Amino acid sequence: MKLTLLGVYGPFPAAGGGCSSYLVEDGDTKILLDCGSGALSRLLKHIPLAALDAVVLSHMHADHAGEIDLVRYALEFGQGKAPIRVFSPEIGTLRRAVFEPVEIKDGMTARVGSLTLTFFAVHHAVPTAGVRIEDGAGHALFYTGDTSYFDGLVRAASGADVLLADACLKDASNEKALKNHMTGEQVIRLGRDAGCGRTLLTHRFGAEPTYPLPADAGNAAFAEEGAVYEI
Ligand SMILES: [Zn+2]
Ligand SMILES: [Zn+2]
């Protein structure tokens, strides 16, 4: 499976950047994981819309789902293959002719082409899902969506080759923010506790996208737009 980082910022982008959006590919299977600002134009640099099999929206905040209506417009103008499956914890606004909305429930699994998706409810201000994506060779990606830290994440991410996790917070000083997002330290610990092969710190805060990482960050690094990982 191949992971391409299209947009890595939230809740708004840094100059020239985009918000949460990732392309997951396994042979002919193509999934757009979140659809924040810049998602569609960046996706189209890699694949035609007609090749896209499904969209997963971790939740409906604008930095993760703000461009889904642009995907809709493109489909309505005859681009791509409608209807396209769109997974989301909230499907009210997705009831459109060009979409086949699928409401995500905690523990639900779904098959998209050669990939198996398992969804986990995570802890955020609105209904939000993390997703574990596994290919036929046993390789796994776990994406947290937006979430505060909780122990269940370790089980959900267990043994994933790549952990792609919300590390929006540079430290734990903002108690309110800690209820909705994780610090880099929490994400690094999660990756270590879950035995993940590589940890990517994403949902980088647009106004201050980098902060010092602990000396023992190990296999963890900030997610960089345009980076591609073979999983
Ligand atoms: Zn976000
Ligand atoms: Zn959010």
Image: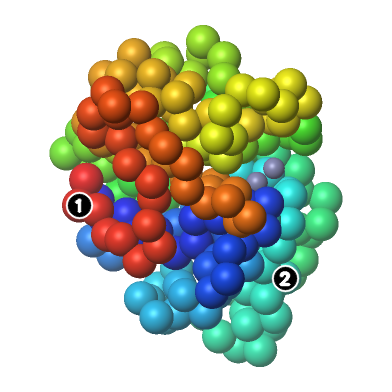
- Residue positioned most to the bottom: 77
Q: Tag 2's secondary structure?
A: helix
| Foreground of the two, 80 or 33 | 33
Quarter of image, res 14: bottom right
* Residue at image location 30% in from the left, 49% down from the top: 114
Mark 2: amino acid: Asp
| Foreground of the two, 189 or 66 | 189
Quadrant for ligand 2?
top right
Q: Which mark is residue 230?
A: 1
Q: Tag 1's secondary structure?
A: strand
* Residue at image location 67% in from the left, 35% down from the top: 128
Judge whether residue 60 can be spotted in this image: yes
The C terminus is located in which quarter?
A: top left
Tell me how many marks there are: 2
| Foreground of the two, 15 or 114 | 15
Mark 1: amino acid: Glu
Q: Is residue 216 above or below residue 87?
A: above
> In the rendered view, does 104 fall on the left or right side of 223?
right
Asked whether mark 2 lies closer than 8 Å to ligand 1, one says no
> In the rendered view, does 196 fall on the left or right side of 57?
left
Residue placed under numbered mark 2 in the picture: 69
- Residue positioned most to the top: 151
* Residue at image location 71% in from the left, 62% down from the top: 66
> In the rendered view, does 147 fall on the left or right side of 92?
left
Disc 2/disc 1 C-alpha distance (Å): 30 Å
Image coordinates for residue 33, horizontal then vertical, percent: 50, 53
Image coordinates for residue 34, horizontal then vertical, percent: 56, 54
Instruction: Give the mark toward the camera: 2 or 1.
Output: 1
Image coordinates for residue 24, horizontal then vertical, percent: 37, 55
Judge whether residue 25 can be spotted in this image: no
